[in-house]
Amino acid sequence: MSTNRDVYGALNDLYDALESAYWAASTVEQKDRIFGVMSIVSHELDELDRKRLRKSNEDYSKLTEEMKTGTARIEQLSRDINGIIHNISVATDVINKATSLLALLK
């Protein structure tokens, strides 16, 4: 089972990749879509920070409701990112980070 530290690192990596994708996106609609996923990831990072203040190194066993529904949006964005971002390295980074996070959450 994944630890809070593993999930936190994967979430943080994905957030950083999405931030690059946001700035590489060329339309407002694309930026809004990426920002929506960034908000879900940011919320989960905040929740983990709160939990980390209370306990450290316990298994990450409970996703917030927002993250439960957000995983589908992360999966869809990672499938569509090549059509949104034309910078191959940014798109690949988002796909890799999303894949790592989703693997930890399963």
Image (cartoon, helix red, strand yellow):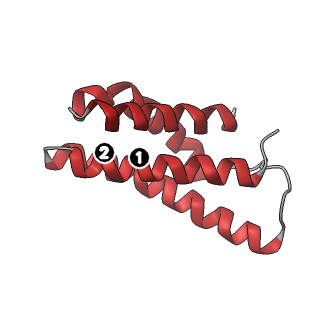
* Quadrant hosting residue 44: bottom right
**What residue sits right under mark 2 in the picture?**
21
In the rendered view, would you say 96 is above or below 13?
above
Nearer to me, 62 or 101: 101
Residue type beneath disc 2: Ala
In the rendered view, would you say 36 is above or below 83?
below
**What residue sits right under mark 1 in the picture?**
17
Mark 1 vs mark 2, CA separation in Å? 6 Å
Nearer to me, 102 or 13: 13
Q: In this view, does 91 lie to the left or right of 10?
A: left
Q: Quadrant of the C terminus?
A: top right
Q: Is residue 78 left or right of residue 34?
A: right
Q: Do the residues under discs 1 and 2 have CB atoms within 8 angstroms? A: yes
Tell me what residue is drawn at x 50 percent, y 44 percent.
Answer: 70
Residue type beneath disc 1: Ala
Secondary structure beneath label 1: helix
Residue 59 percent across, percent down from the top left: 84, 49
Task: Using a 10 Å C-alpha cutoff, classify the residue at mark 1 as few (fewer than 14 neighbours), some (14 to 19) or many (20 or more).
Answer: many
Residue 1 percent across, percent down from the top left: 82, 38
Tell me what residue is drawn at x 54 percent, y 31 percent.
Answer: 99
Residue 37 percent across, percent down from the top left: 41, 48
Nearer to me, 70 or 16: 16
